[in-house]
Amino acid sequence: GENVEQHPSTLSVQEGDSAVIKCTYSDSASNYFPWYKQELGKGPQLIIDIRSNVGEKKDQRIAVTLNKTAKHFSLHITETQPEDSAVYFCAASSGSGDKLTFGTGTRLAVRP
Amino acid sequence: NAGVTQTPKFRVLKTGQSMTLLCAQDMNHEYMYWYRQDPGMGLRLIHYSVGEGTTAKGEVPDGYNVSRLKKQNFLLGLESAAPSQTSVYFCASSYYTGSEAFFGQGTRLTVV
């Protein structure tokens, strides 16, 4: 089955700096890669996603890049703000397309 | 629009007791999932369903059973609770694997 590795597990940045979270996946047939943000006491919420036919996608301060050859994808947050502090999860669809496999999460802290 | 609703939100069980967690979605989604979240281990898939009347095992199915008798409901059962099942449980639903998954608020279960 699919295996998703996520790094780093914790990340602390100064407000205004950029943050980068990286994930690798094992199943070359995976074709959907979402990123979720989980705030304290809440369920995860989708913030951005990318499909295998696209190399990069951007939404305001958030961008995701995908390298299918190397089987890794990354989340980039620019001009970080205190409200960006949360746990972020990457995920990849399985080759059979019937379920998502999540990474182990990155706890991001933005220092004011 | 309620989205995905989980009941109960908190529960304490004694070892050996049984209980059922209920997940209800009002978005007419075909796919529903049960995950457990443990520190440092991300979101691990317990069971999932690709439509009414179907269920399938995920990554960590042992000790759990599920049923999807109605499209809008997905039940997770623990027949004989063990301390290792202490966790936060999340239900999610989506139209299909390659679309946004919506999560409930979670159920914090403690088995003593």
Image (spheres, coloured by chain):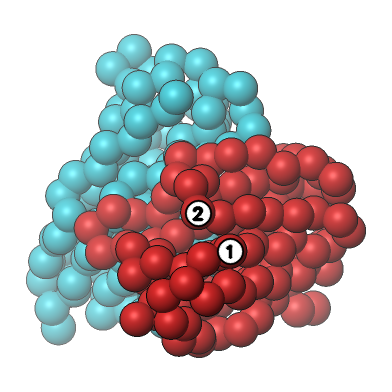
For the C terminus of chain A, the quadrant is: bottom left
Side of B86 relative to B11 (left or right): left
Q: What type is the residue that disc 2 sits on?
A: Gly
For the N terminus of chain A, the quadrant is: top left
Compared to residue A17, the image places residue A40 above or below, namely: below
Q: Colour of chain A?
A: cyan
**Residue at 51 percent of width and 46 percent of height:** B61
**Residue B63 numbered mark, or none:** 2
Query: Dividing the picture into quarters, in which one does residue B110 lie?
Result: bottom left
Residues under numbered marks 2 and 1 in contact, where contact means CB atoms less than 8 Å apart: yes
Q: Looking at the colours in the rendered structure, which chain would you say is drawn in red?
A: B
Percent across and percent down for residue B8 are 61, 84
Q: Nearer the viewer, residue A67 or B29?
A: B29
Q: Nearer the viewer, residue A59 or B31?
A: B31
Residue B86 visible? The answer is: yes
Which of the two labelled residues, at mark 2 and mark 1, occupies the earlier sequence position?
Answer: 2
Residue A53 visible? The answer is: no
Side of B63 relative to B100 (left or right): left
Percent across and percent down for residue A52 are 51, 24
Task: Farthest residue to the front: give it.
Answer: B16
**Residue B79 numbered mark, or none:** 1
